Image: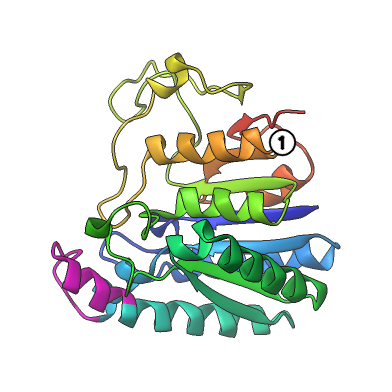
Amino acid sequence: MRIVVKVGTSTLAHAGGRLNIRRVELMCKVLSDIKNAGHQVILVSSGAIGMGTGKLGLPGRPGDMPGKQAAAAVGQCELMYTYDKLFSQYSHVVAQLLLTAEDIHHSGHSAHVKDCLERLLEWNALPIINENDAVAIDEIGIHTTIGENDSLSAIVARLVDADMLVLLSDIDGLYTADPRKNPDAVLIPRVDAITEDILALAGGTGSSLGSGGMATKLRAAQIVMEAGIDMVITNGEQPDILYDIVDGKAVGTRFMGKD
């Protein structure tokens, strides 16, 4: 299979922004093993701003745009250094792609991005993608910024005709209510269509370090389902759950791509 895996900041880092070393090491080991089994993997990784916040010793995620850009510039170096070091232990080569919305929306640019990704996969490299947070600014608008990596991962999955998109988050999947507030909330194992009722279940941002929430994940689901691609939302606390997903076991919430 060709699998796009998106990992959120809350999975990669502790609450203070510092790298969750044990979890990231396990994730890289599992992804390497999945590649060794013959699957193609693209990793869309958040975490640049969060890791930059931690490395700079800031009290929290910067609130102003220049601060976010600066933290991203520092954190992206740390992020790729970590990935390169960990994947190299399992003899896998990583490649970095930093994208903006223009790279996606401009037909010529997106064709070049697709060609580059196809060649990297042909050469058995592991592409690691993030939005170019140092230059993509939310205030400019949707035509020049994507804003969060749930949508970016869905766009990438559609671009490369992936078989599956997996969103590793800080929640087990889509619930009938917010499980953090409602103990009676029930996990929804399968979604066949994004209806108004499903959209109404989306809450706000889940993590103080990240920029996504369930609403962005449902937007991602809409993108890939229309393209016939399945998507799974699951908790990234135990990255070896990826084995179960690849094996087709029921994990988290699975959004069924249209035939």
Q: Say if residue 18 shows up in the picture.
A: no
Q: Which residues are magenta?
A: 56-72
Q: Position of residue 153 (x, y in %)?
A: 54, 53
Answer with the quarter of the image where residue 42 lies. bottom right
Amino acid type of the residue that numbered disc 1 sits on in the rendered structure = Gly
64 drawn magenta: yes
Q: Position of residue 258 (x, y in %)?
A: 71, 28
Residue at image point 58% right, 34% down: 252
Pick the front one: 183 or 232: 232
Answer with the quarter of the image where residue 226 lies. top right
Is the residue 121 above or below the residue 140 in the image? below
Answer with the quarter of the image where residue 95 lies. bottom right
Callout 1 environment at 10 Å: few (<14), some (14 to 19), or many (20+)? some
Is the residue 35 above or below the residue 2 in the image? below
Q: Position of residue 158 (x, y in %)?
A: 65, 49
Q: Say if residue 122 shows up in the picture.
A: yes
Left or right placement of residue 97 versus residue 204 in this view? right
Left or right placement of residue 240 versus residue 176 in this view? right
Left or right placement of residue 16 versus residue 103 in this view? left
Pick the front one: 76 or 239: 76
Q: Position of residue 181 (x, y in %)?
A: 28, 25
Query: What residue is pinned by disc 1?
Result: 228
Left or right placement of residue 61 versus residue 17 in this view? left
Pick the front one: 109 or 213: 109
70 drawn magenta: yes
Residue at image point 63% right, 32% down: 254
Is the residue 83 above or below the residue 34 in the image? below
Residue at image point 46% right, 71% down: 21
The C terminus lies in which quarter of the figure?
top right
Where disc 1 sits, the SS reads: loop
